[in-house]
Amino acid sequence: MSEQKNRNGIFWVVIAAFVLFFAPHYAIADEALRLYNQGYFAKAVAIWKKDAKTGLPKAQFNLSRAFLTGKGTDKDLDQALYWLEKAAKGNYPPALHNQALQYLEDQKISSALQKLEKAANQNFPASLYSLGKMHQAGLTGSENPKKAFALIRSAGELGFHKAQYNLGKMYRDGYGVKADMKQSTQWFLRAAHQGHLKAQIKMIMRYQKGVGISADPAQAYKWLLIAEERYRGFSLTKKKKLLDSLSLEERNLAAAEAQLFRPVLEK
């Protein structure tokens, strides 16, 4: 893989992967976070400042993000970087992960790998996933399908929906693992239940054609309605064909299930 392709692949690997405050799969309930989520930003920041000065990496990381976003305090990039560095020195996975992404933006691949590996060794899902994508893209020196699959599988098992969607593709294509359409569909389904749009679109076809799962046009229509809330690219012909295969009762039941659907993050 050429150096140029490596560089272009960096952003494909980590796009939208920065961790804000607590990642969904790394959340630890505390008073400051509760206040922040309720909109009491300044009160939350006051607690984080106090705890950060005592050396608590979790508070240092959240304080860094507060200085970066300007919620509850004035924006201050120097302070944001200062507290991020403190949290990373405390070996706090979200901080290590965000530092890694900064190194990637600066094309410092080896430094990024070191940070990601430290976070991945603590089973931080976002870092396991990003590290796996780097092995897949050949950014670790050479492409390593088996290593990529193992890392992304670990992230998927921990509930990281991007990893679950990628596992669906890996099992479909036999990338780093023996092709298995049942496993592929199950991983797409797990990601779909967490709100992953592309996975939801995959489930329309899987249920419609019975790929890796028993055919169920009503379930296909349900996922179409769910995905249609955010994606308007479905052809009227495709939608009509699906509708024509259902009874009025099946249509109404699928519509009711779609209306009740809410993404549920895996804990």
Image (cartoon, grey):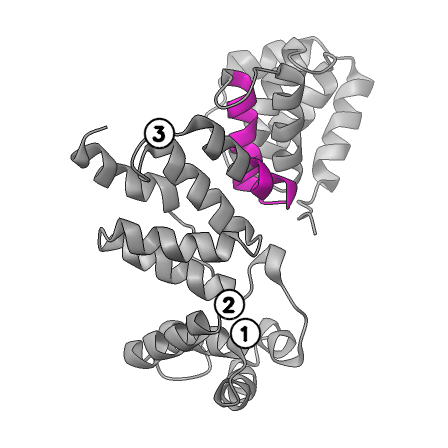
Query: Mark 3 — residue?
Result: 143
The numbered mark, 3 or 1, whose residue comes first in the sequence reads 1
Residue 159 is one of the magenta-drawn residues: yes
Per the rendering, the mark at residue 145 is: none
Q: Relative to 69, say whether 2 is above or below.
A: above
Mark 2: few/some/many CA within 10 Å (<14, 14-19, 20+): many
| Residue at 53% from the left image edge and 83% from the top image edge | 48
Tell me the residue that label 1 is attached to. 58
Taking the spot 80% from the left edge, 27% from the top edge, the residue there is 253
Magenta span: chief secondary structure? helix
Verify CB contact (< 8 Å) between mark 3 and mark 1.
no
How far is disc 1 from disc 2 in space, using C-alphas?
Answer: 7 Å
Q: Which residue is mark 2?
A: 92
- 2, above or below 235, in the image: below
Which residue appears at 73% of the width and 19% of the height? 218
Disc with the residue nearer the chain's start (2 vs 3): 2
Q: Which residues are magenta?
A: 153-172
Which SS class for mark 2? loop
Report the amino acid beneath label 2: Tyr
- Distance of label 2 from label 3 (alpha carbons): 28 Å
Q: Residues within 10 Å of mark 1 (few under 14, many from 20)?
A: many
Foreground of the two, 163 or 253: 163
Q: Nearer the viewer, residue 265 or 217?
A: 265
Q: Quarter of the image containing the N terminus?
A: top left
Q: Secondary structure at mark 1?
A: helix
Q: Please state which amino acid type lies under the numbered disc 1.
A: Lys
Residue 28: x %, y % from top left: 65, 68
Residue 244 location (% of width, % of height): 67, 9
For label 3, count other residues whose C-alpha is less than 10 Å away and answer few (under 14), some (14-19) or many (20+): some
Q: Position of residue 247 (x, y in %)?
A: 78, 13
Question: Is 267 drawn above or below residue 186 in the view shown?
Answer: below
Asked if residue 228 can be seen in this view, the reply is no
